[in-house]
Image (cartoon, rainbow, N blue to C red):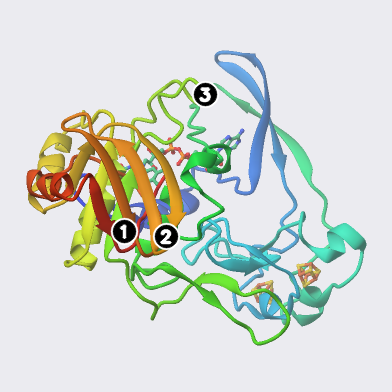
Amino acid sequence: MFGRTFPALECAACILTPKMVAASQHDRIKLLTNSELVQVLGKAGSYRARILKKARYVDEKGCVACGLCSEACPVTVPSAFDAGITTRKAIYLPFQQAVPNSFLVDAANCLYQTNQTCGACARKCPNGCVNLDEKDEVIEIAVGSIVMATGYDVLDVHKIGRYGYGKHPNVLTALEFERLTNDSGPTGGRIVCRTQKFSGSAMPAEWTFNPLGVSPRRIAIIHCVGSRDANHNRYCSQVCCMYSLKFAHLVKEKLPDAVCYEFYIDLRAFGKGYEEFAERIRQEGTFMVRGRSTSVTESGNGLVIRGEDIMSDRLRISGRYGSAGYWSDSGARERRTEQNSGHRLRCGRVVYGA
Ligand SMILES: Cc1cc2nc3c(=O)[nH]c(=O)nc-3n(C[C@H](O)[C@H](O)[C@H](O)COP(=O)(O)OP(=O)(O)OC[C@H]3O[C@@H](n4cnc5c(N)ncnc54)[C@H](O)[C@@H]3O)c2cc1C
Ligand code: SF4
Ligand code: SF4
């Protein structure tokens, strides 16, 4: 999902995809994809792991990833890989470099699985590799040791109503912003505002990212959304400071004339090369604002972010459009402007990330 990674701005796909292919081809590694560890029995040295192998409904060895099944599929749902900012079909390839490079059916949305209707994909596949009657199976394997690497889960930002996620189309989560800035993402890496697409029919206009759309002039990034917060997660995510700084760098690289603000409560740049990376972002001209941001609202001409700036005084930012955001320190020059104008900053578009 990621384009470039902090702190060295390396290409994530270049690091990960050769390793995924190597793991899948290694004669002593058995890769179980679309599978979930459901139970562990036994003791150290002699565990029995129960694994739910979910039905793929596509023979992964026969599938040549031609995509004809997907073209025939009538169901369109938000793409999890694109963090919901684009859509995919109910039969789909999870992402371009997926291992195995084979399509699969999303049973929850497939009409055959839910209503016993359709079957268009099976009829269309030239290799006869779609089997819509395949069943899940539970397998048990004997293992000596287990490495747990179950990772993170994302917070549902709808729970924090004051930032207007889901209400203001240009307030985005971090993962949505990742996909927007990704060179292989839906806009080819162009940072644009979400705009309304009218279909001409009676259907309501859709909010989409048009690769040729208008770019934001001001972007705000909010750290710690739902973290270190007694109402949500008390702990620190340990990654949002750094990926927020990475976003500021990408904004400056892709939109050199845009103004970027980061709102943070503490800057936790604790790893190797992290402090240097934070300093680099300051040097690139991102304004860092220290304090809790309290709300994102719509005004006549755009979004307004309210928050405190504990290094100086209260802060109010306003603008014409919004997108998604993360925040850190505000530069002295901008802070003076803000004080001169009664704690109000003009904001062309605002980006909020969680
Ligand atoms: C927006 C964003 C940007 C980021 N940018 C960067 C960056 O630039 N640089 C950087 O170094 N880090 C970055 N990070 C942090 C980085 O993504 C994580 O630290 C990293 O993904 C953690 O890897 P992981 O393998 O431990 O967990 P994950 O990537 O979360 O993978 C865990 C996997 O385990 C699977 N799983 C969970 N439970 C089970 C089960 N019971 N059975 C089978 N499988 C299961 C999950 O489905 C998942 O695929 C970013 C994070 C976010 C959210
Ligand atoms: S059977 Fe399911 S996956 Fe196949 S085309 Fe119909 S809805 Fe799509
Ligand atoms: S039509 Fe068949 S071979 Fe082509 S991608 Fe779909 S399942 Fe794979």
Q: Closest to the observer: 302 or 108?
A: 302
Q: Residue 104: percent from the left, percent from the top?
A: 67, 62
Establish if 70 lies above or below 343. Answer: below
Q: Name the residue under label 2.
A: 179
Neighbor class of circle 2 (other Cα within 10 Å; few <14, some 14-19, many 20+) is many
Q: Mark 1 points at which residue?
A: 14
Residue type (three-letter) at the residue carrying disc 2? Arg
- Which residue is more in the foreground, 66 or 77? 77
Which residue shows up at 36% across the image and 55% down it? 351
Residue identifier under label 3: 231
**Quadrant into which the C terminus falls:** top left
| Residues at circles 2 and 1 in contact by the CB criterion of under 8 Å | no
Disc 3 packing (10 Å; few <14; some 14–19; many ≥20): few
Residue appearing at x 60%, y 45% in the figure: 32
Mark in the foreground, 2 or 3: 3
Image-based side of 40 in relation to 157, left or right: right
Which quadrant holds residue 116? bottom right
CA separation, marks 1 and 3?
38 Å
Report the Cα–Cα distance between label 2 and label 3.
28 Å
| Image location (x, y in percent) of residue 323 | 40, 59
> Could one spot residue 289 in this view of the protein?
yes
Amino acid type, callout 1:
Cys
